[in-house]
Amino acid sequence: MLLRHTSAEPVERTGLMINPAKTCQPIGAMYAALGLHGCLPHSHGSQGCCAYHRSALTRHYREPVMAATSSFTEGASVFGGQANLLQAIDNIFTVYEPDVIAVHTTCLSETIGDDLNQIAIKAKDEGKVPEGKYVIHASTPSYVGSHVTGFANMVQGMVKAFSESTGKRNETLNIIPGYVEPSDMEEIKRMASLMGLKTIVFPDTSNVLNAPQTGKFRMYPKGGVTVAEMKATGDSKATIALGPLASDLAARKLDTLCKVPCHTQELPIGLQATDRFVDTLRKVGGVSVPESIAVERGKLLDVMTDMQAWFYQKRVALFGDPDSLVSLVEFLVALDMHPVHVVTGTPGKAFEQKIRELTAHLPVPVNVKAHGDLFLLHQWIKKEPVDLLMGNTYGKYMARDEDLPFVRFGFPIFDRVGHSYFPTVGYMGGIRLMEKMLDALLDRKDRDSPEESFELVI
Amino acid sequence: MSDEKNTAAKLEKIKAEILAKYPTKVARKRAKQILVNRNDSTGKVPEVGANMRTVPGIITQRGCSYAGCKGVVLGPTRDIVNITHGPVGCAYYSWLTRRNQTRPESDTAENFMNYCFTTDMQDEHIVFGGEKKLKQAIQEAFDLFHPKAISVFSTCPVGLIGDDVHAVAREMKEKLGINVFAFSCEGYKGVSQSAGHHIANNGIFTHVVGLDDTIGKGKFRINLLGEYNIGGDSFEIERILDACGISLVSTYSGNSSIDHFANSHTADLNAIMCHRSINYMAEMMESKFGIPWIKVNFIGAESTAKSLRKIAQYFEDEELKAKVEEVIAAEMPAVKASLEKAKPRCEGKRAMLFVGGSRAHHYQDLFGELGMETLAAGYEFGHRDDYEGRRVLPSIKVDADSRNIEELHITPDPKRYAPRKDEESLKKLESEGLAFREYDGLMPDMKENTLVIDDISHFETEKLIEMFKPDIFCAGIKEKYAIQKSGIPMKQLHSYDSGGPYAGFKGAINFYEEIERMVNAKIWSYITPPWAAEPELSANYAWVA
């Protein structure tokens, strides 16, 4: 057994986290910054942070992930990292020529109390920031929240640095897509454009972290929201923030700074959350829903109808990030599935409350934990078995030990491709999610059926 | 450029072109770390700048001290509960990402490799201290798993807030009655992973080595140092040693158990693979227990044969020597057959290797066996001795960053010190060509007019690719896709992508096949679509032509 020391009986732990279901803020900040065109993320801390974040993002996306570091040594840790960051800014603009450097902190620079705002101003005063170029920043202490918090903080940093109001409102809608895949960001843009809406989606990692092979490496790929677009967000009619944890902070900041009203809602994963997204686009954008969107919805509903039998009352264990789990649980419930064990590593009791509401009417008990870990989830599974496990690649150890069908969903996915290219948001994303679940469930049925009831037609 | 010969003048020009992009101070520093190799008949090579700080903002391959300590050296040991004391990230990123394989003694034997343990420090622990949380974590790990050992790894904030991890470890060791020890391997220590290797060596040596004096079975008993069983390398080396009748007391630390470490001072020879990460251990074991060490290399079939012969030579046993020859003779036909297939399709192609503290050296042997040329190479975290050989050790200036890493002063163990060979027989063996405490480094093995670059930056990587268009480039995961997007096949030599083993005889065969596949892949010919190859708008009817 791969996880041979995991017993079925959960005991309360207050000191030790085993097999985390989250990682730290800076990686989320780095991911968000990659969704800004011409931006080089910069990690203000020891070299290892940057190396680890780049490695993890690279393994997940199989794309170049460029980022720099302040390369703290013991001296910098004692005397502060200002000199390192000033030098880094100078070197980066000279050697790598980005339009923007997006600096995020680490637990090290947070603990010593480096003031990024002051250092950024000093860099500008000292002429280290060329004309028309920018240093933006976000505070992302690793000992608060999770990678999703870091994403939220950097998106807020983008708003703080760029969004400006000229006093002339236009019809454009801002959409903050949340901590989702490049494919999802692409899909959100596609849906809004089907609705006939002009949008600014930020951050936007499509065509950055799913860029084509052209035989030519681009340090700054073609995708990403541009600085000009970011500035223009302050004149937009409204902001739709998808995924409260990842996107609400920036949307509210935009409201405060530029009086752009915001609508925060769940990630459009599954039927109902996508319905609400489309309806918000309709109402806020002042448009009607086109036939093409209605057709996509109908297709999703059609697959739900056709395959309902295979989803009915299947017990599912899930782990991942709060925003995506809330929508996913709602979808599974709509499919008449039973999401019975739900864990996120990100702290925050609101998550537990929300999952309880969504599953309150189910005829089975539901375990839910925020700031939990995979060791606990595994213990729950051992005690009360499930038919399906959904989560990131780390789930495959449990899946193999417990002989469970397993669907990869979330971050990170280190051992398969697809997530960068095929969305899980929107109606078409819903069909893909069902396809993945059905593949796993029906492969299992085919494997386990007695020969006489092994069926050609299912 | 590919057909021209690389002359020193041309390479110097390329170097100047690269340096021209940097601000003056950075250029001055990088100039010491980018060298055109000279290699005269005496083996004298130029002095390289190594183990120096990376300049902030210059995109580096390097990681941190924690990665070297927890990730590299202690990572592959299966039966220690390794608790990372800090916020969640460091533990998370070092969880199963290095492909260290392990084979527990039985289905129920301890194996914590697939687990990740962390104190997951929150802001209140940063403000009020994390010692209480750490103690609680150790207690919970003990209650849940009853392991024979628990170790603690400090991350950056732990050092800053002043948690005394060693005091906590001592207290819990006493309380629980198992071995508990801690490493102060905060990420900001030193200039790269290398500092973490040293800290790990010191910690294991102090807290584990020598705890079990049982003399195990076997006539020829060795330790293998600096081999981490990535992709199963150790398994292949174990297979070969076993076939030769050589007993492996402990590997540091591929496929290892803490019990092996505890007993490793009973071995009669230390054979070092990765000099950079583990030479401290060999030196300390020699001083304390009298075990001599030699450098070996099991990467490459010829190198494997050579290393086996060196071990046999050390034991001065005719039977062993004969057995080693027998094993080599049995293994080589398959190697030769594979090489005969791969070599014609690889010969003359050119490689670049920027990886590790020894792999950029070792893997040149495999490329050499394939008839491929290494144009440029360098280490991510090597020191001058890894480049120029240990002969330069006395002349290496110890800077502030290195001084911060503790140097243990080891004296002979009053009870256990037993020189395995007297001075006279060591001298005799040396005169017969077996070098002790010696590593000649990468540069003497590289040709004249090749490039040696320490701590290569992303910018330099891009320039090399643009100017040389090598047939294959070897580095790590962070570099992989930037290189492949440039249309050059890229082989990871940290994790081997998903391949391996590449050590030993079977490993060599795997490597030949892998490189043969990569340098001849059709993919690269498809990059230009047909409409871009012939962009004229009026169609020429294909069936007419």
Image: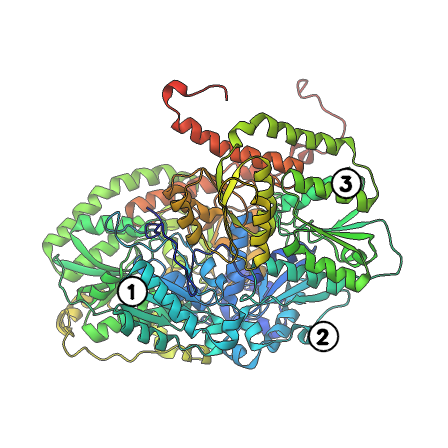
Nearer the observer: mark 3 or 2; the answer is 3
Q: Which residue is mark 3?
A: A193
Q: Chain of mark 3?
A: A
Q: Amino acid at mark 3?
A: Ser
Residue A454 higher or lower than B313, as above or below: above
Q: Residues within 10 Å of mark 2 (few under 14, many from 20)?
A: few
Q: Secondary structure at mark 1?
A: strand
Is residue A425 something one can see in this rendering? Answer: yes
- In the image, taking residue B21 as reference, residue B180 lies left or right, namely left
Nearer the observer: mark 2 or 1; the answer is 1
Quarter holding residue B266: bottom left
Residue ID at (60%, 66%): A140
Count of numbered marks: 3
Residue ID at (36%, 75%): B168
- In the image, taking residue B236 as reference, residue B93 lies left or right, namely right
Q: Chain of mark 2?
A: A
On the same chain: label 2 and label 1?
A: no
Residue ID at (55%, 74%): A111
Q: Foreground residue, A232 or A222?
A: A232
Q: Which residue is mark 1?
A: B149
Mark drawn on residue A66? none
